[in-house]
Amino acid sequence: DIQMTQSPSSLSASVGDRVTITCQASQDISNYLNWYQQKPGKAPKLLIYDASNLETGVPSRFSGSGSGTDFTFTISSLQPEDIATYYCQQYDNLQYTFGQGTKLEIK
Amino acid sequence: EVQLVESGGVVVQPGGSLRLSCAASGFTFDDYAMHWVRQAPGKGLEWVSLISWDGGSTYYADSVKGRFTISRDNSKNSLYLQMNSLRAEDTALYYCAKDIGYSGATPTHLDYWGQGTLVTVSS
């Protein structure tokens, strides 16, 4: 099974900061990588699919990049409403794996 | 508006069984694959199971294979998860989620989620 290693596990940043989260797959997954946001007490929300495609309605300050085994999720200018836990998720051969999550806090 | 409403979560003893349901509305249910994803208290997300649009293909995480069964009734716009031989480590909030995969397309990402139903396995 493919394992996903997400880092950091937690992150504190100031409003307006550029924030980057990484996700590494244990083997080549091409661009089969998605990113979700989960706010406290809420269901996850899809932000980025297929590594770099912005889901409809998601603000353009969110972006994703990468392919193969190494992927990056970026918030270009952190806003107070971005406080959440972020998860990467891979899909390969009809098996799906989430990263451990990155809890983002405002400094 | 897409809505997914889970139900059936309760407190159950180890070794017991439980059936979760998910009522779907706001989209053509029988066009899309569906997932179950769970989240243990204070922990991350864990994919549990996938069923194809027509119910003909099912897939499971190793942690639940042989114990859980996913099914759907397209005439009732409903998704189910039959959970047998429950263990303490199955305690979690169980979400149903719609996949973007349309008809026979490969399911790839989960674009709508319910609010979850809590399953607690404890004696």
Image: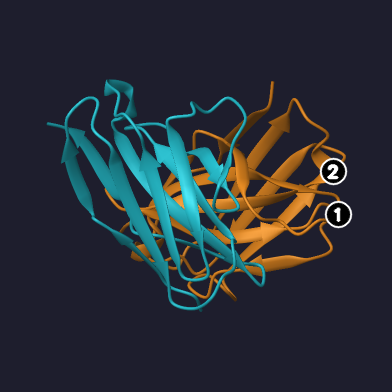
Can see residue B107?
yes
Whether marks 2 and 1 lie on the same chain = yes
Could you tell me which residue is drawn at 54 percent across and 69 percent down?
Answer: B61
Along the line of sight, the residue nearer the viewer: B59 or A89: A89
Mark 1, residues whose alpha carbon is within 10 Å: few (<14), some, or many (≥20)?
some
* Vertical placement of residue B69 versus B43, above or below: below
Judged left or right of residue B113, residue A40 is left
Question: How many numbered markers are drawn?
Answer: 2
Q: Are marks 2 and 1 in contact (CB under 8 Å)?
A: yes
Q: Position of residue B116 (x, y in %)?
A: 49, 38
Q: Secondary structure at mark 1?
A: loop
Q: How is the image coloured?
A: by chain
Q: Please tell me how crowded label 2 is: few (under 14), some (14-19), or many (20+) other residues with Cα within 10 Å.
A: many
The reply, left or right, for residue B3 in relation to residue A6 is: right
Query: With A37 as the anchor, is A8 left or right in this view?
Result: left
Identify which residue, B101 or B86, lies in the foreground: B101
Say which amino acid is labelled 1: Asp
User: Does residue A71 appear to the left or right of B3 in the view shown?
Assistant: left
Colour of chain A in the image: cyan
**Colour given to chain B in the rendered image:** orange
**Image mark for residue B54:** 1
**Is residue B120 visible in the rendered structure shown here?**
no
Task: Give coordinates of residue A39: x percent, y percent.
Answer: 36, 32
Q: Which of the labelled discs sits on residue B92, or is there none?
A: none
Location of mark 2 (residue): B30
- A98 over A17 or under it: above or below: below
Residue B82: % across, % down: 62, 58
- Name the N-terminal-most of marks 2 and 1: 2
